[in-house]
Image: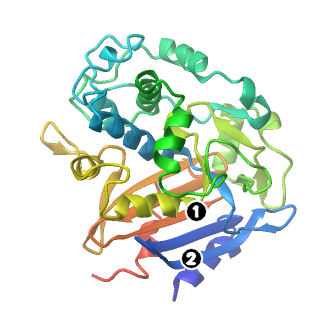
Amino acid sequence: MKSIQDFLKHQVENNETPGIYYALFDTSAIICKEKYGFANVKSKTPVNDLTTYNLFSVTKTFTALAVLQLAQTGIIQLDAPVSDYLPEMPYQAKITVRQLLNHSAGIPNPLPLRWIHLSSEHDKFKRDNFFNEVFKSHQKLDTKPGTKFKYSNLGYVLLGQLIEKVSGQSYEDYVTEKIITPCGIKPGTLGFEIDSSVHATGYQKWWSFTNALLGALIDKNKFMGDKEGKWKPFNNFYTNGTPYGGMVGSGDALIKYAQTLLRNEKLLLNYIYKELLFTESIINNKPTGMSLSWYTGTLKGHKYLAHAGGGGGYYVELRIYPALGMGSVIMFNRSGMTDERILDKTDSFFLTD
């Protein structure tokens, strides 16, 4: 591809996604922003700056930040047992707060694709009741706490419960008050509620293995609409576990969040805890490739921190390059089930060795 525009247009024109949003930014401005394709195929609504997406696991970076804020104030200790703060902790082993944060607690990670509910069911949905049953079905740890890196959505469900217990607020209220609002993010552009007037419809490519797999995991008659060309749309839905994957937002809002983290200021965390947030975890003398919720990596010699969020209908990547004071975000309204590191390709158009 000759340019970033060619690469992004190809994604839409080659039916890799109905719509796409990409931006590269520094601490105060957007360097490049491109949008192509449709937020809704049937109505031909174009992707725009206000288009929101399900962010899935990008939410974990907010959860970890919230926990570190509470640690910074002394309300919790990172190396204390979670059970000190959460007596109803479903595992008897001594698991620390830090081990939940860096995915070394050994907690199982069952496939979460079916852990969703429709927007029409959201007001009555009780996530703690749902996960009480999940924990009962997954009572045995996969590894001894602190001995091995093992990614776990359930670990971040517990962190969400911990935040609520010690703060006295709902997870949603705490993150909104302590993270989203201080970043200067406009109401309605990042949060926990879907606004159907600006939310992108999520899609699954009709002729694909994943579409067949979804039939075994979810009720497609309930969660998906009729085929539209090469795509099968999802009806608006929420993940059952908000702290591990329940946020909804636009690319512009994620930029505001990342810019605030990049700036040399103490608005969200002091310098000590910010460094802790971004330092790669070492477990049994082995680098894990992850800090406290952010994956680590290098592109053209530049170190970065990143997290992807993927599932049915949506795929998002957020990345920051702390030494460069830069970051990037890319958003698709098509399913993504693995960490694709697409920003390696897009950002390479701008970064030099």
Label 1 secondary element? helix
Q: Earlier in the sequence, mark 2 or mark 1?
A: 2
Residue 352 in view in this figure: yes
User: Which residue is disc 1 drawn over?
Assistant: 251
Q: Position of residue 278 (x, y in %)?
A: 28, 52
Tell me the quarter of the picture where residue 14 sits: bottom right
Determine contact: label 2, label 1, CB under 8 Å.
yes
Q: Position of residue 268 (x, y in %)?
A: 37, 50
345 left or right, relative to 10: left
Front residue (pair 345, 102): 102
x 35%, y 18%: residue? 85
Q: Is residue 132 above or below residue 33?
A: above
- Label total for image: 2
- Disc 1 packing (10 Å; few <14; some 14–19; many ≥20): many
Name the mark on residue 297. Answer: none
User: Which residue is disc 2 drawn over?
Assistant: 33
Tell me the quarter of the picture where residue 44 sits: bottom right
Residue 103 in view in this figure: no
Front residue (pair 15, 253): 253
x 30%, y 63%: residue? 264
x 53%, y 50%: residue? 181
Label 2 secondary element? strand
Q: Is residue 115 above or below residue 205?
A: above
**Residue type at tag 2:** Lys
**Residue reaching furthest bottom?**
2
Q: Is residue 255 above or below residue 293?
A: below
**Residue type at tag 1:** Gly
